[in-house]
Amino acid sequence: MKSNVSREHRSAALVTGASRGIGKAIAAAMAADGWEVTGTCRNPKRLAAEDRIPGVRYLPLDFSRKASVEALLKKVKKVDVLVNNAGSGSIGPVEEATIEKVRALFEDNFFGAVRLTQSLLPRMRARGTGAVIFIGSMASEFPRAFSSFYAASKAALRAFAECLRMEVRVYGIRVSVVAPFFIATTFPQERQVKKGSPYAEAVGRVKQVRDRSIMAGPEPQVVADVVMDLLGKRRPRAFTSVGHRARLQAFLIRHLPRRIIEALSARRFKL
Ligand SMILES: NC(=O)c1ccc[n+]([C@@H]2O[C@H](COP(=O)([O-])OP(=O)(O)OC[C@H]3O[C@@H](n4cnc5c(N)ncnc54)[C@H](OP(=O)(O)O)[C@@H]3O)[C@@H](O)[C@H]2O)c1
């Protein structure tokens, strides 16, 4: 899919987490549409030739290392579009999570994107144009047991993005959240369950349903198509869900009484 953005508005894009999955599909779609794309991953030197998209420049970015964002920004001078896609997942009971692991998850899914966005906004504001797209998750909209921290990190990202959108639109900067709902990638979920945990069996059931749903999900290209579509719009939507019947699911989540949503979640995840 081609974006309708005029040439001068689509010169340079930074896509985080472009080594595979959704980020790779977005980087490929943008490169094919003529964007000058910089893609990141933790170790580009280890990126296999078949995972490299022709024309995309790969740079290292690791949210677990404090200096990583600054090092990246020294090498990337101009960014018209920032796609905050990189992220990580976890599954486990709240009782058994260590706060260090929770903080690390928030670094990957929230603070990393915040720091990059903060650093790039001044240049976009000075030019009077730019776009920031956050890859959120429908996990923040639909309650799922043992996803408390992942869902919370994505809910924080959504709230942040929606407020930012109101803050910078007068400067010509467009902000959107794209929330995937089970896309066929190898997105890992770190299992944080203690030995002998009373929750172990239930976590296993939820994980099984989640893994099957991911495997049965559409290809990451559907997310890239949504991103390209948003980039082509003067006034892109604030929040777009994407995935198998994502629109219907988002509509039901918004309109059904919460007790029905909870019953549906318990049934779907066999709780
Ligand atoms: N797949 C789904 O069903 C789904 C659903 C909802 C939301 N999402 C969101 O979509 C985004 C992409 O997920 P995906 O499914 O495409 O997963 P993926 O295939 O595992 O890709 C994740 C990307 O993030 C990068 N990354 C991971 N940890 C990082 C860190 N600490 N610092 C910097 N980069 C890091 C990875 O790079 P490395 O090469 O360095 O590992 C990789 O490029 C995530 O934000 C995820 O939460 C996915």
Image (spheres, helix red, strand yellow):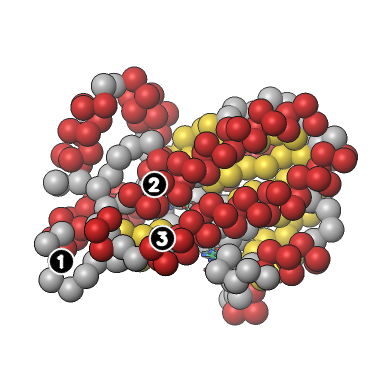
Apparent side of residue 194 relative to residue 143 in the rendered image (left or right): left
Looking at the rendered image, the quarter that the N terminus falls into is top right
* Residue 209 on image: x %, y %: 23, 52
Q: Residues within 10 Å of mark 2 (few under 14, many from 20)?
A: many
* Residue 267 on image: x %, y %: 16, 39
Q: Earlier in the sequence, mark 3 or mark 1?
A: 3
Res 128 quadrant in image: top right
Apparent side of residue 271 relative to residue 75 in the rendered image (left or right): left
Tell me the residue that label 2 is attached to: 151
* Residue 3 on image: x %, y %: 71, 37
Disc 3 and disc 1: Cα gap in Å?
A: 19 Å
Res 265 quadrant in image: top left
Residue drawn at (24%, 66%) of the image: 193
Q: Amino acid at mark 3?
A: Val
Q: Nearer the viewer, residue 98 or 196?
A: 98
Residue drawn at (37%, 24%) of the image: 254
Disc 2 and disc 3: Cα gap in Å?
A: 12 Å
Tell me the residue that label 3 is attached to: 102
Tell me the residue that label 1 is attached to: 197
Q: Earlier in the sequence, mark 1 or mark 2?
A: 2
Q: Residues within 10 Å of mark 1 (few under 14, many from 20)?
A: few
Q: On screen, 256 above or below 10?
A: above
Q: On screen, 167 above or below 68?
A: above
Q: On screen, 145 above or below 171?
A: below
